[in-house]
Image (tube, rainbow, N blue to C red):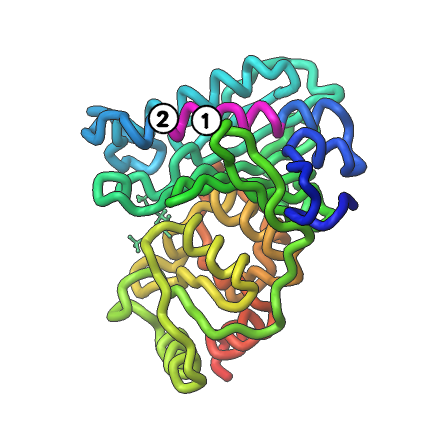
Amino acid sequence: MIKQAGTSKFQIDLRRHLRSQNICDNLVHLMCEIAEASKYVINAVRTGDLGVAGTSNLYGEEQLALDVLSDRIMRKRLIHSGVVCNIASEEMDEIYQCQANADGLYSVAYDPLDGSSLVDVNLAVGTIVSIYAGSELLQPGRNQVAAMYILYGPRVSLVYTVGDGVHEFTMNNLMEYTLTRENIRMKPEGDIYAPGGLRNKYTEGNEKFIRHLEDKGCKLRYSGGFVPDINQVLLKGKGLFMYPALQGSPNGKLRVLFELNPMAFIVEHAGGAASTGTIPILDLQPESLDQRAPVYIGCAEDVKTAVAFVNGK
Ligand code: AFP
């Protein structure tokens, strides 16, 4: 553990902090390469074309020019890193193999620009990254060796875990990521909630749960962007995000590989929890790249209460 963040005159940069973790050089190098890629994604978000790309992704959704550009930036950087075996992106239809031999290498699943439809209304968006050792991407999220997200908001911040604490870095005016919060911990129960999906499609259990949160005085905080919404719950250390099963869409909306696994890995290592309403997100065995699942993620007691309501408390 490094001296308390922000108290020393020395700014602790990402590479130095990663080196202080008990992880191998290849993983340090990979995570620093992803941080470097985010500097080009920022530029694209701030100045790039806000129009459509004229193509559609794995889900048949229309791709924005920013989706395609940020995906290309991330993919090139991951290939260039030399330590990646397989890549899966929310914007690509299938797994891309960089190297056949997976010894000592990693496989990466990422959402290059989650919430991209919010950029043209100037709301915060983010990049989400999930890392596994070896070649296999379709495995339970609990096997991740690292997860990180980069939030492009009023400030640019990066949050990561390698399974030993959750740490936040903020970009300084030299475009370097320096440590701002170390070993972030969530409280057992919270006072904010972020409910995704159409309320008139909520099941009775979910509707009762929302009323329970409102009765206990929780404030609604939902931006429509998974990364800023999770960042708020995580850094305030008190709250819950949910995108439940809806009438007509039993698996909700969010994607297991690109969104749920990395965020669940981060939140669980900050003392929170993440559930489908039936099992922990990290115990899910993904069957396909485009698999979706309902999610309740945040303070452990709030997630437990959600599961109870959803299962007919
Ligand atoms: P987009 O990437 O299509 O903007 O979707 C964003 C997202 O995947 C996630 O960031 C949000 O939490 C969720 O979808 C918002 O969904 P609703 O628009 O249904 O609220």
| Residue hosting label 1 | 39
> Residue at horizontal 63%, vertical 25%?
30
The answer to whether any part of residue 92 appears in the image is no
Q: Which mark is residue 266?
A: none
Above or below: residue 218 compared with residue 181: below
| Residue 160 falls in image quadrant | top right
Q: Position of residue 43 (x, y in %)?
A: 36, 26
- Residue 295 locus on image (x, y percent): 47, 59
Q: Is residue 102 left or right of residue 98?
A: right
Q: Are marks 1 and 2 in contact (CB under 8 Å)?
A: yes
- Please check the rendered image and state whether residue 205 is part of the magenta-colored stretch, yes or no: no
The answer to which quarter of the image holds residue 269 is bottom right
Which kind of residue does numbered mark 1 sit on?
Lys
The image shows residue 127, relative to residue 308, as above or below, that is above
Q: Nearer the viewer, residue 19 or 255?
A: 19
Residue under the point 57% across and 41% down: 169
Give the magenta-colored segment's residue range.
Answer: 31-43
Q: Residues within 10 Å of mark 1 (few under 14, many from 20)?
A: some
Instruction: Depth check: give the residue in front, 241 or 209.
Output: 241
Q: Residues within 10 Å of mark 2 (few under 14, many from 20)?
A: few
Name the amino acid, label 2: Asn
The number of callouts visible is 2
Main SS, magenta region, reads helix
Q: Is 108 above or below relative to 246? A: above
- State the SS at label 1: helix
The residue carrying mark 2 is: 43
Q: For the point 51% across and 66% down, which residue is it? A: 277
Q: Give the residue displayed 40% in from the left and 20% down from the top.
A: 72
